[in-house]
Image: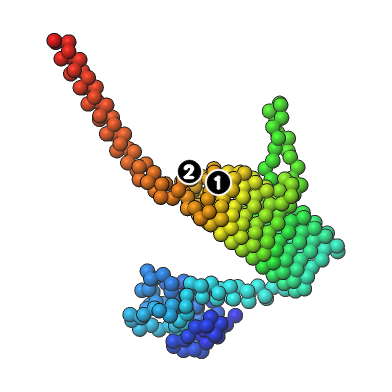
């Protein structure tokens, strides 16, 4: 896909400084820009590369003031970071639109119903009763179980597995290796010390505009539903257990784990490697620092960190104390020795009298 500077400016509502006819076909980081690529400048620490980049077009904020001449054509926009996100989405969408047809090496049940302009890659399997909307992209080696429903414009990358009965909304993106609807971790201890598996009879419901990273596992509910609400973004390598509910527009970073029946509110931010215990409620707007362990309910708009997680400011004070523990230990050992010596002196003086 080739776009001119003027076309990009029109799409973004920006203004061109330089050659409006210069064209690009790909995006690049500003420090690695080369002819034919589009870059952006949003972080001031990368400003030096603006004056040396070989990129053809650079997106910058309208308020940015040049300190040196530049060779690239500039497009001034209200927010360069948001603008480049828009352009990357456009480039990716155009690339996706090139995918069409059904590979003869795929297997589609005659009792499945596919919408218009659906792409099905090689070695994908779509079971009976499954339904897709229009413009769905199903890449090679995807498994779609019985009675699965998938909304319009959703993309399933290679190796995605969706178990029986699960429902995926419109405009979702699910990356390679993700498993939707695997059994929840439910086992009943027996008198002989063994464990009896508890049948997981529910489903997973993923609402519209959700993105799920690679190798994410979202377990089906023991009964009823595990729910990921609209607009949620989940990074790679995240585990979401049975009967969890995640609210609208929540963001979860890599390697987080959420135990069964936990309720996460809307517009929450969950940092990397966070662990959330089961059967608790994370209130709307909660922000959780990386590597935190959350074992209690939170209040609205709380910012917490640490393990166990506490108020962020308190955790920072705790960390400051932790750093001084070795010094405090040495001081205490020294004080103990001094006290012992004083005791001996006092005891000796008492004995002499």
User: Which mark is on residue 139?
Assistant: none
- Residue 56 visible, this angle: no
Residue drawn 50% across the image and 81% down it: 36
Q: CA distance from mark 1 to mark 2?
A: 14 Å
* Residue at the extreme left of the image, as rendered: 353
Q: Earlier in the sequence, mark 1 or mark 2?
A: 1
Rendered location of residue 71, percent (x, y): 40, 84
Q: Give left or right: position of 287 versus 196.
A: left
Question: Contact (CB < 8 A) between labels 1 and 2?
Answer: no
Q: Is residue 107 above or below residue 339?
A: below
Name the residue tied to disc 2.
307
Q: Is residue 252 above or below residue 45?
A: above
* Residue at the extreme front of the image, as rendered: 300
Q: Give left or right: position of 165 versus 326.
A: right
Rendered location of residue 78, percent (x, y): 47, 78
Rendered location of residue 267, percent (x, y): 56, 59
User: Quadrant location of residue 105?
Assistant: bottom right
- Residue 170 visible, this angle: yes
Residue drawn 47% across the image and 50% down it: 304
Name the residue tied to disc 1.
297
Number of other residues with Cα within 10 Å of mark 2, as a class: few under 14, some 14 to 19, many 20 or more: some
Residue drawn 20% across the image and 15% down it: 347
Q: Is residue 148 above or below residue 15?
A: above
User: Quadrant location of residue 253?
Assistant: bottom right
Q: Give left or right: position of 213 versus 124.
A: left
Residue drawn 32% across the image and 37% down it: 326
Number of other residues with Cα within 10 Å of mark 1, as a class: few under 14, some 14 to 19, many 20 or more: some
Q: Secondary structure at mark 2?
A: loop
Rendered location of residue 144, percent (x, y): 75, 59
Q: Nearer the viewer, residue 37 or 247?
A: 247
The C terminus - image quarter = top left
Q: Secondary structure at mark 1?
A: loop
């Amino acid at each position: 896909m080739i776009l001119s500077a003027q076309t990009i400016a029109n799409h973004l509502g920006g203004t061109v400084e330089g050659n409006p006819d210069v064209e690009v076909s790909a995006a690049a980081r500003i420090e690695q820009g080369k002819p034919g690529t589009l870059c952006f400048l949003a972080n001031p620490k990368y400003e030096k590369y603006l004056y040396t980049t070989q990129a053809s077009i650079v997106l910058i904020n309208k308020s940015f003031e040049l300190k040196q001449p530049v060779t690239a054509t500039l497009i001034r926009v209200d927010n360069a970071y948001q603008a480049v996100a828009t352009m990357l989405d456009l480039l990716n969408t155009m690339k996706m639109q090139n995918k069409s047809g059904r590979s003869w090496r795929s297997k589609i049940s005659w009792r499945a119903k596919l919408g218009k302009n659906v792409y099905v890659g090689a070695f994908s399997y779509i079971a009976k009763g499954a339904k897709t909307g229009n413009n769905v992209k199903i890449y090679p080696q995807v498994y779609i179980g019985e009675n699965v429903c998938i909304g319009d414009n959703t993309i399933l990358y290679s190796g995605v597995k969706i178990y029986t009965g699960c429902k995926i909304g419109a405009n979702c993106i699910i990356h390679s290796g993700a498993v939707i609807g695997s059994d929840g971790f439910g086992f009943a201890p027996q008198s002989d010390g063994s464990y009896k598996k508890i049948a997981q009879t529910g489903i997973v419901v993923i609402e519209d505009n959700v993105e799920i990273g690679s190798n994410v596992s979202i377990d089906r509910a023991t009964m009823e539903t595990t729910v990921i609400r609209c607009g949620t973004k989940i990074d790679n390598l995240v585990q979401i257990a049975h009967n969890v509910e995640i609210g609208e527009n929540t963001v979860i970073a890599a390697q987080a784990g959420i135990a069964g029946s936990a309720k996460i509110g809307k517009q929450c931010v969950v940092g990397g490697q966070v662990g959330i215990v089961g059967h608790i409620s994370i209130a709307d707007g909660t922000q959780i620092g990386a590597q935190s362990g959350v074992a209690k309910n939170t209040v609205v708009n709380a910012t917490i960190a640490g393990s166990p997680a506490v108020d962020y400011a308190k955790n920072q004070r705790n960390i400051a104390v932790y750093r001084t523990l070795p010094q405090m230990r040495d001081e205490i050992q020294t004080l103990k020795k001094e006290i012992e010596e004083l005791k001996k002196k006092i005891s000796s003086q008492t004995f002499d009298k």
